[in-house]
């Protein structure tokens, strides 16, 4: 049975009861759960005795003019999904519970939080890391499960946990996609038919890049950007090939692991996607 909690005392009582000395996995989400989130829940279920999910649309990670107010909120359906995946405890606090006062002390993501998504959404990763840090404090989980879908977030969370000795293990789950390749996202529902059609170019570009990984960074970027340029229905924010540990752009002659990142706007809707690849290795 999934227990819904709202306040901190409710959460702690539910965790004390559910945990009973076993391991705890936490899956932080903003709700509007889809099959991508459900893959995270299943991963958590398979790797810990107790599974907890947080559902919180974190105002601190939204900039002025972003979609905080219209971000989808579907708590009843989310609870059904959690129950179906065997989640033990859901915490769905209101903003007043998480931030009883405007925070004076927050986590600063550093330089890795100022590039790519962070360049377009200033302060976004400070908000993400601050809430993840607070969630780790509230739940004291053994494992926290994230999606590879938000690759920059994952890199920064891993660094925060290491740099601040937060003591939780971070596990990543591969991106879940639609049959045509589009990465599942709570924001896909905003796309109209034409935009939905154009959006497939993101994953097509990533695949084209990956298929050229044997030929090195320049060829990867050339192949991916050719696909993006052929799709007029979107505005590209960035296409970048980066070192997965540092988020710095890789050198032309780099070999080994890299991350190909892309972000684009379809009307008012921004989508991001990425793929890991191995430079110098045949695809
Ligand atoms: P969100 O609710 O969008 O903040 O996402 C919560 C978690 O789900 C994050 O760790 C995301 O990376 C992950 N996630 C979102 N979409 C996907 C997807 N298509 N596949 C795998 N994980 C995802």
Image (cartoon, rainbow, N blue to C red):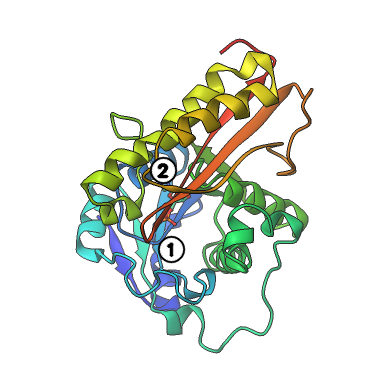
Question: Can the viewer see residue 23?
Answer: no
Image spot of residue 56 (x, y percent)? 41, 68
* 3D distance between C-alphas at marks 1 and 2: 19 Å
Q: Which residue lies furthest to the top in this view?
A: 282
Question: Ligand 1 near label 2 (Cβ, under 8 Å)?
Answer: yes
Image spot of residue 260 (x, y percent)? 59, 34
Disc 1 and disc 2 in contact, CB within 8 angstroms: no
Instruction: Give the quarter of the image for residue 225.
Output: top right
Image spot of residue 5 (x, y percent)? 34, 71
Instruction: Using residue 144 as the reference point, say whether residue 53 is left or right of it.
Output: left
Q: Could you tell me which quadrant the C terminus lies in?
A: top right
Circle 2 Cα neighbour tier, 10 Å, few/some/many (<14 / 14–19 / ≥20): many
Which residue sits at x=45%, y=64%?
16
Task: Name the secondary structure under disc 1.
Answer: helix
Circle 1 Cα neighbour tier, 10 Å, few/some/many (<14 / 14–19 / ≥20): many
Instruction: Give the quarter of the image for residue 137.
Output: bottom right
Please tell me which of labels 1 and 2 falls first in the chain.
1
Instruction: Using residue 84 as the reference point, say whether residue 51 is left or right of it.
Output: right
Front of the two marks 1 and 2? 2
Mark 2 — residue?
40
Q: Which residue lies furthest to the bottom in this view?
A: 101
Task: Name the secondary structure under disc 2.
Answer: helix
């Amino acid at each position: 049975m999934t227990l819904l909690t709202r306040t901190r005392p409710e959460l702690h009582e539910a965790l004390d009861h559910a945990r009973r000395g076993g391991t705890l996995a936490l899956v932080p989400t903003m709700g509007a759960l889809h099959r991508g989130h459900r893959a995270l829940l299943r991963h958590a279920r398979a790797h810990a005795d107790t599974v907890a999910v947080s559902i919180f649309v974190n105002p601190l990670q939204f900039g002025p003019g972003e979609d905080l107010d219209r971000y989808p909120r579907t708590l009843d359906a989310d609870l059904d999904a959690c129950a179906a995946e065997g989640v033990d405890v859901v915490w769905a606090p209101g903003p007043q519970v998480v931030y009883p006062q405007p925070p004076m002390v927050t986590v600063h993501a550093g330089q890795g939080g100022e590039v790519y998504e962070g360049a377009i959404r200033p302060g976004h990763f400070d908000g993400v890391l601050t809430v993840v840090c607070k969630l780790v404090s509230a739940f004291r989980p053994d494992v926290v499960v994230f999606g590879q879908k938000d690759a920059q977030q994952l890199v920064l969370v891993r660094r925060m946990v290491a740099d601040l000795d937060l003591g939780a293990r971070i596990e990543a789950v591969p991106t879940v996609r639609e049959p045509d390749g589009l990465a599942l996202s709570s924001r896909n529902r905003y796309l109209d038919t034409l935009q939905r059609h154009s959006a497939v170019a993101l994953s097509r570009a990533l695949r084209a890049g990956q298929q050229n990984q044997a030929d090195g960074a320049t060829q990867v970027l050339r192949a991916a950007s050719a696909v993006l340029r052929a799709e007029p229905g979107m505005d590209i924010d960035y296409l970048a090939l980066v070192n997965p540990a540092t988020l710095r752009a890789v050198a032309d002659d780099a070999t080994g692991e890299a991350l190909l990142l892309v972000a684009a706007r379809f009307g008012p809707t921004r989508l991001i996607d990425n793929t890991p690849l191995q430079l110098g290795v045949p695809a």
